[in-house]
Image (spheres, grey):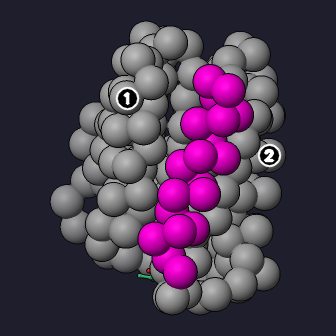
Amino acid sequence: MKIGIIVFSNTGNTLSAAERLEKKLSGKGHAATLVRLMPKAGYRAGQAPTGFEELPALDRFEALVFAAPVNAFSLCLPMKEYLETIEPLRGRKTALLTTEFFPYGWMGGTRAIAMMRRACEGKGGVVCGSAIVNWSRKDRERRIEAAVDEIAGGLIG
Ligand SMILES: Cc1cc2nc3c(=O)[nH]c(=O)nc-3n(C[C@H](O)[C@H](O)[C@H](O)COP(=O)(O)O)c2cc1C
């Protein structure tokens, strides 16, 4: 299956988790492609972007993953704004990944996932998996592994 992993990441945490997912899906024989969502120059973490460098074409993918960090107890603004602009997902399998610094989902992760879910379902996507990685937790490695398994399972399981 051709799977697009669309990632926004300020400092590399979400990107590194998404890369693990890409590796896992590729290892299972799927054509997983990671695409970074890049705001235009001048973007500063926590602020709204003034646009994006290049919008990834989604129609070449059969399934999609959207991955982005929590900012200010919510989904970061670049991913929020991006999801408002994407083309219809037309029943495609969609999975969601977020990372946050704080140890509990109620500190932003749960809300970020809910926002991505609402946006993707609003575009006709079928959300088949989601995961939060709490970056400050001691067992972060295990949580990244579990998040990757959860999302891969939903997409290809
Ligand atoms: C502007 C800003 C706001 C943030 N707000 C939160 C927050 O509300 N809750 C939280 O758990 N982490 C928060 N964080 C931490 C990031 O969510 C966390 O470090 C995440 O893993 C960063 O992912 P990234 O490296 O892919 O950008 C914030 C970070 C920034 C830069």
Image-quadrant location for residue 93: top right
Magenta highlight range:
139-157
Q: Which amino acid type is marked by label 1?
A: Gly
| Residue holding disc 1 | 27
Q: Residue at x 76, y 35 (%)?
A: 127
* Percent coordinates x, y for residue 57 in the rendering: 40, 21
- The alpha-carbon separation of the residues under discs 1 and 2 comes to 30 Å
| Residue 140 is one of the magenta-drawn residues | yes
Mark seen at residue 94: none
Q: Residue at x 37, y 27 (%)?
A: 26
Residue 101 is left or right of residue 157, and the answer is left
Mark seen at residue 118: 2
Image-quadrant location for residue 62: top right
* Front position among marks 1 and 2: 1
Q: Residue at x 76, y 68 (%)?
A: 111
Count of numbered labels shown in the rendering: 2
